[in-house]
């Protein structure tokens, strides 16, 4: 596309990043607020339909401006899918399986990455217009499947509407009580302020920002580094890295959610047994050992955060080994695989704790803020490149002066 329509480098960079990413992130805030109030099925179907039409529009574009407009529309439409999905998951899945369910959904990004690689094969055989047409066709199919399978929020909205219109006294009283507990009307800014005032949520956002930064820097700069470090293995690296990102990333994400839910159930059971033991003649169980340490410092929700913390700490030495393996390409790739396996377990458990911390009426807005956090972290690879570039320039200047 960029060759056919004669994009400049700056135009291509805008299409590949800002035109989609930042609008996607800021639109997620609005989408999250709407997902807290309106029919999530309708939001999902509308989102899928609009981004499909935008994809098909790109396939027919004749100028850069037409592609840019389609990308902007696509970014805004895609933003409505994640908040609707995560709020549906939070409502429909029991809390003891919430991290696993979020991990399953979030791990789709690895499958998407694999399909994106396969789209290069389509491009070679059908051209970029035909490829976008095929992708748009899958979008139509996704819209139809979503319309069939997704549960409607009609009953939920009828109750809310009746309460707001005063048709149901008990519902109205319940809604008024909920609004009072939430601190007033549930609009975007008040909800965002209330969410960010929760200490646990503040910790989640700060830690997630750092985690996004590290993951994005590795994702952007790993390929140039390893191709420079192992020039004779560049073709092999492309295949191995695809397996590592797809296989190890997917495995880590799914296992992370499953293990985190297991930890939550274990702590809950331990606390119940401790309370039960306190009511017997034997008195309170012994407070020694790892079990009691975890029980005393974590509840069934926060214990889920232990896995992302440990995984991120283990990823540090694994990444160090991957980048300090000398000329041993196989050893470097082994440690890169280990790094992905221990690091990518964080997403599902983190989202689950975030959902449980903000309450059901604000999960969409919280998800929008979470996506915005990731968007801010997108600046990290650029900053790293700028720092490294300046060091190279300084080093070259020093060598020349000598």
Image: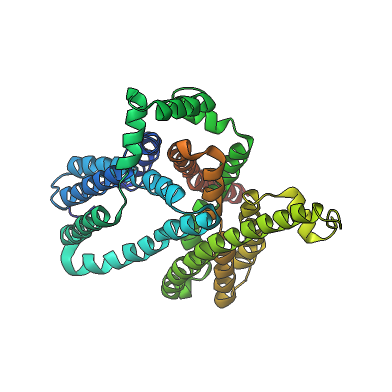
Residue 127, percent from left and from top = 17, 63
Residue 340, percent from left and from top = 54, 64
Which residue is at 19% across, 61% downward? 134
| Nearer to the camera, 353 or 125 | 353
- Left or right: residue 203 versus residue 51 is right
Counting every numbered tag in the picture gives: 0
Residue 107, percent from left and from top = 44, 60
| Nearer to the camera, 181 or 298 | 181
Q: Could you tell me which quadrant the N terminus lies in?
A: bottom left
Which residue is at 65% across, 53% downward? 303
Say how the picture is coloured. rainbow
Tell me if residue 180 can be seen. yes
| Nearer to the camera, 46 or 392 | 46
| Nearer to the camera, 350 or 389 | 350
- Left or right: residue 347 versus residue 113 is right
Q: Quadrant of residue 294?
A: bottom right
Tell me if residue 5 can be seen. no
Which residue is at 51% across, 71% downward? 230
- Left or right: residue 28 versus residue 341 is left
The vertical placement of 325 against 319, above or below, is below
- Left or right: residue 183 versus residue 83 is right
The vertical placement of 132 against 64, above or below, is below
Residue 333, percent from left and from top = 54, 72
């Amino acid at each position: 596309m960029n060759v056919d329509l004669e994009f400049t480098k700056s135009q291509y960079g805008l299409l590949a990043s800002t035109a989609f990413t930042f609008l996607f992130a800021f639109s997620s805030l609005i989408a999250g607020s709407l997902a807290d109030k309106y029919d999530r099925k309708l939001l999902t179907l509308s989102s899928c339909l609009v981004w499909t039409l935008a994809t098909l529009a790109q396939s027919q574009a004749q100028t850069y401006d037409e592609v840019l407009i389609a990308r902007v529309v696509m970014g805004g439409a895609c933003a409505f899918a994640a908040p609707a999905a995560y709020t549906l998951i939070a409502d429909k899945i029991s809390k003891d399986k919430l991290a696993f369910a979020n991990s399953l959904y979030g791990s789709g990004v690895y499958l998407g990455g694999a399909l994106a690689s396969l789209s290069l094969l389509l491009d070679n055989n059908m051209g970029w217009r035909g490829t976008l047409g095929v992708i748009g066709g899958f979008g139509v199919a996704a819209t139809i499947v979503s319309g069939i399978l997704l549960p409607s929020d009609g009953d939920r909205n009828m109750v809310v509407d009746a309460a707001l219109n005063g048709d149901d006294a008990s519902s109205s009283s319940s809604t008024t009580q909920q609004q009072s507990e939430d601190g007033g009307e549930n609009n975007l800014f008040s909800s965002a302020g209330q969410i960010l005032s929760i200490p646990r949520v503040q910790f989640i956002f700060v830690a997630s920002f750092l985690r996004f930064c590290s993951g994005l820097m590795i994702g952007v700069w790993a390929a140039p580094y390893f191709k420079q470090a192992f020039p004779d293995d560049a073709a092999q690296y492309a295949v191995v890295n695809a397996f590592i990102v797809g296989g190890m990333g997917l495995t880590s994400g799914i296992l992370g959610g499953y293990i985190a839910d297991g930890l939550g159930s274990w702590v809950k059971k331990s606390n119940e047994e401790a309370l039960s033991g306190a009511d017997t003649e034997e008195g309170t169980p012994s407070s020694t050992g790892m079990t009691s340490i975890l029980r005393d410092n974590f509840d069934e929700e926060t214990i889920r955060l232990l896995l992302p913390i440990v995984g991120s700490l283990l990823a540090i030495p694994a990444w160090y080994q991957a980048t300090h393996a000398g000329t041993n390409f196989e050893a470097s790739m082994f440690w890169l695989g280990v790094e992905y396996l221990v690091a990518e377990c964080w997403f599902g458990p983190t989202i689950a704790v975030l959902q449980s911390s903000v309450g059901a009426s604000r999960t969409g807005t919280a998800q929008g803020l979470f996506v915005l956090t990731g968007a801010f972290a997108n600046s990290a690879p650029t900053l790293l490149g700028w720092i490294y570039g300046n060091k190279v320039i300084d080093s070259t200047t020093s060598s020349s002066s000598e």
